[in-house]
Amino acid sequence: FFFSSRRRHTRLQGDWSSDVCSSDLLLVIGVSSLLIRLVSPDPGVYLGVGWRAIFGISNIQLYAMSSDYFGQDIALNPFTHTWSLGVEEQFYLVFPWLVWISGFGRKPTGRKFLSALLTLIAAPSLIIFLWLYPHQQAAAYFLMPPRFWELSAGSLLFAWQIGRHSSASSQ
């Protein structure tokens, strides 16, 4: 669990142990922060979203601001696009536990149990998304629970492909 999370974190946010990458990251954050302070009338809002992006929760901040992703108030925020990384990071905090609970890769029924578990969680997630979208678009857009079904759909396709491959190779 720890090593897969570390690899995913490294892929999404860079290798923090590398001196070159760390200095590059600090340079980008520093220059971006300086430029935002120079050109923005309210830099605290933008920097708040950027700071939360480091921890994978910028989507929650953008939801709290009730931002419209295509709205005028978001157009100048250079950290707006980080909402999707926040949703993905939050999904990857839950997903390894589901894999572990299901026994995927360790038990013969693990793939089927993981598929059932994902379906049981994804179905209400889709229903929540469909209900929220007309009533609270910001919640449907920025928060992980209404988006869980999208990420689990990819996992279900993978499990189906593995099952198809294993049944074809056993014949």
Image: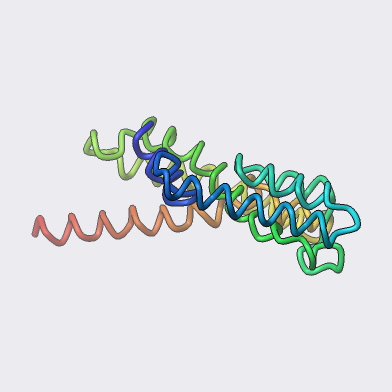
The x, y position of residue 4, in whole percent, is 36, 39
Q: Nearer the viewer, residue 44 or 135?
A: 44
Of 79 and 101, the residue lying toward us: 79
Q: Position of residue 130 (x, y in %)?
A: 71, 58
Q: Nearer the viewer, residue 87 or 14?
A: 14
Q: Is residue 47 left or right of residue 119?
A: right
Between 97 and 50, the residue placed more toward the observer is 50
Q: How many marks?
A: 0
Residue shown at 54%/50% (left/top)? 25
Residue 60 relative to residue 98: left or right: right
Rendered residue at 77%/57% (across/down) = 36
Q: Does residue 44 appear to the left or right of 144 in the view shown? A: right
Residue 34: give x, y in percent of width and height: 74, 54
Give above or below for 118 relative to 83: above
Relative image position of residue 124 (x, y in whole percent): 62, 46
State the quadrant of the N terminus: top left
Residue 114 falls in image quadrant? top left
- Residue shown at 27% from the left, 38% from the top: 109
Quadrant in which the C terminus is drawn: bottom left
Residue drawn 61% across and 43% down? 54
Side of 126 relative to 113 (left or right): right
Tell me, what colour scheme is on the image?
A: rainbow
Q: Residue furthest left?
A: 171
